Image (cartoon, helix red, strand yellow):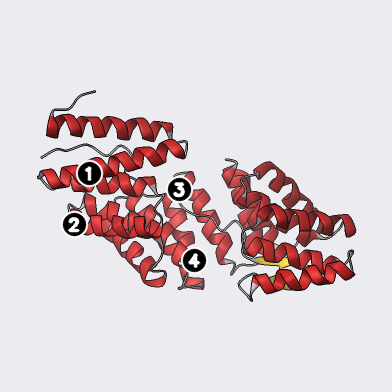
Amino acid sequence: MYYQSNSFSTPDSQENHFQDNRTVTDKSQWFVRLEVRDYNAELEYYYQIIQNEPNNVAAHYQLGTAHLAIENYPDAIANYDRVIELQANNAGAYHNRANANTALGNYQEALADYNRAIELDPNDAVFYNSRGAVLSYLGDLTQAIADFNKSLRLNSRYSSAYNNRGNAYAKQGNFESAIADYNSVIEINPQDSLAFLNRGIIQYKLGNQISAMADFTHCLRLNPKYGKAYKNRGIVRAEMTDCEAAIADYNQAINLNPADANAYYHRGLASCAFDHNVAYQAAIEDFTKAAELYDRQGGLDEYELVMDIRQDLLSWVYGIED
């Protein structure tokens, strides 16, 4: 049987709630939720208003909200730019423009806008949570945790801030505190699939495979289309030598996200557990696909490692050398 040690077998890192899908239009704190309506109709409606009233702040703001919802971040930024031109003290516009920049990976621009939003409204728990998430992305975990603490002082039932603080603790290696925060998320919202995913990752890192498996499985009950949960459960199953079930999970992960290089890589490793040429050929194909995706996505180290594994397997099975 061909065996290759798995050099990057850990599940995905935790996911942040970098925005909690709430947007503020004015000082009266009127919140608009993004999980609503037909956004094409919304866009058409507010564009018509702006044609007649080009300085209508609320219409520009709602256009930004709709663009955020459909992940059209450049247009969302343009709408919030216009809101800020018309109403320079609109804290919600700064916050939501920062959300759009966060989604684009423009973390410094986002941080500047979150700072401004907090200057304008220092008592909004959402703003501190969002800034904390960006600080975490930038590697300033101490200040990020301070922001999550502030957010939770303002709203002790804010599950998103618990999730994000748990992620920051996890990055610091403070796994027990991370689990405590994920437990708080689940206590507040038992339907939060992300909290089960994140807690499962920490359980895995602590060596608690059964608990990790249970969390990934529960995550999938809540959200059957969560590709990362399938992949992470597959990793645990493979380590527990249930490679057939692991491959089934990787298949699901790939069906949900065909660009997931790690899923192909892990499926290739699991195939190597079956000592016959058909399985080895399947593994070679998966390593080839993983390497292609790593190369395309800028994962040079992963690309080189997978290519080395692929060549070793070719040599071992077929005696082929470059």
> What's the mark number on residue 174?
3
User: SS class of the residue under badge 2?
Assistant: helix
Residue, far top = 322
User: SS class of the residue under badge 1?
Assistant: helix
Above or below residue 222? Residue 113 is above
Q: Picture coordinates of residue 235 (x, y %)?
A: 29, 51
Counting residues from the N terminus, which is met first, the one under dot 2 or under dot 3? 3
Q: Give the label, 1 or 2, closer to the camera.
A: 1
Q: Quadrant of the N terminus?
A: top left
User: Residue drawn 40% across and 66% down?
Assistant: 225
Counting residues from the N terminus, which is met first, the one under dot 1 or under dot 3? 3
The amino acid on which the numbered mark 3 sits, given as a three-letter code, is: Asn
| Whether label 2 touches label 3, CB < 8 Å | no
Above or below residue 93? Residue 28 is below
| Whether label 4 touches label 1, CB < 8 Å | no
- Per the model, the C-alpha gap separating discs 1 and 3 is 36 Å
Q: Picture coordinates of residue 220 (x, y %)?
A: 37, 67
Q: In the depicted view, which residue is nearer to us: 286 or 206?
A: 286
Q: Quadrant of the C terminus?
A: top left
The amino acid on which the numbered mark 4 sits, given as a three-letter code, is: Ser
> What's the mark number on residue 283?
1
The residue singled out by tag 4 in the image is 184
- Per the model, the C-alpha gap separating discs 4 and 2 is 35 Å
The amino acid on which the numbered mark 1 sits, given as a three-letter code, is: Ala
Above or below residue 141? Residue 178 is below
Q: How many marks?
A: 4
